[in-house]
Amino acid sequence: MPGTLECLLRLALAALCGGIIGLEREIRLKEAGVRTHLIVGFASCMMMIVSKYGFFDMLEFAAAHNYDTMKLDPSRIAAGLVTAISFLGAGTIFTRNRGITGLTTAAGLWATVGIGMTTGAGMYWLSIFGTCFIVVIQAILHRDHVLVGHVTAAVFVQLSDELDGPERLRQALEGLGLTPSGCKFERRDDGVSATIHFDRLPCPAGELGRLLAPLMAEPYIKSLRW
C-alpha cells in the first residue's frame, strides 16, 4: 500500500490533469470548466484509492480472527464510479434550436473520471498521456475546425407576406455562398416563417452574424436569428 505522501501526490496529479482538461473547455465557454473537471478528477482518484487500498484492515481483521469466508472485491467502487458520473455528464447536454450541444463536454467529464482512476491506481504515465490526448483532440477537432468544417444547426428567418419571398431568400443565400441542406416554410398571420438548416458553413459559427448581415438590409426580411 502506498504511503500518505504518495496518495496525496496522486490526488494532486489527478486534480492537475482534470484542471487542464477543464481549462480547454472553459476557454471555449462550455458548461463545465476548470472547477468541475478538477473536482471530478480529484474525487475519482480519491475513490479509486479507497477502492484499491481502503479495505486492507478488514482483511487483516479477518486473518486475525480466522474468518475464512470474508472476501473483498476492490473493483466494485471503481465500477460504480464509471456509472455514477453519467448524471453529471447528462447535466451538460442541452437541446436548443433543434440541435444538441454539450456532448463533447460530457464525454470529457467521463474521460476525466478515467484519468482520475488511472492516477489513483498509480498508473501515472498513462494518466498523463490520457490528459494530453484529450486536450489535443478537443483543441484541434473542435466544432469550427477546418478538418471537420464549420457546422451550425439552423437559421430562423421571418419574411413579410410576399409570394416571391422564399425564392428571393434562396437567391440571397446563394449569393452569400450558403447552400441549405433543408428548408421549411410556414405561413402565419404576420408573414412567412422559414427554418433553414445548414450542414456546413464557409465561416466559423461565431462569424455567422457578419455573414448574414446583408440579409437584414432586404425589405422583405423582418427578423433573423440562429
Image (spheres, helix red, strand yellow):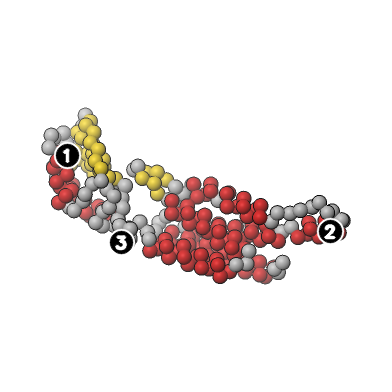
Question: Left or right: 27 with respect to 59?
Answer: left
- Which residue, given by chain and number where applicable, does mark 1 sit on? 166
**Marking on residue 39:** none
Amino acid type at circle 2 is Ala
Image position of 103 (left or right of 152): right
Name the residue at the right extreme.
65
Q: Earlier in the sequence, mark 1 or mark 3?
A: 3
* Amino acid marked by disc 3: Val
Mark 1 vs mark 2, CA separation in Å: 81 Å
Residue 95, how many percent across, how many down? 40, 43
SS class of the residue under badge 3? loop
Check disc 1 and report its element: helix, strand or loop.
helix
Q: Marks 1/3: CA distance?
A: 31 Å
Whether residues under marks 3 and 2 lie with C-beta atoms below 8 angstroms apart, the answer is no
Residue at the (50%, 55%) spot, across then down: 109
Residue at the disc numbered 3: 146
Q: How far separated are the C-alphas under marks 3 and 2?
A: 62 Å
Count residues near mark 3 (Cα–Cα under 10 Å), then give few for <14, some for 14-19, many for 20+: few
Asked which quadrant contains residue 154, the reply is top left
**Label 2 crowd bin: few (<14), some (14–19), many (20+), radius 10 Å:** few
Question: Which image quadrant for residue 14?
Answer: bottom right
Mark 1 or 3: in front is 3
Left or right placement of residue 125 versus residue 146 in this view: right
Frontmost of labels 1 and 2 is 2
Residue placed under numbered mark 2 in the picture: 63
Name the residue located 35 percent from the left edge and 42 percent from the top edge.
98
Residue 101, visible in the rendered structure: yes
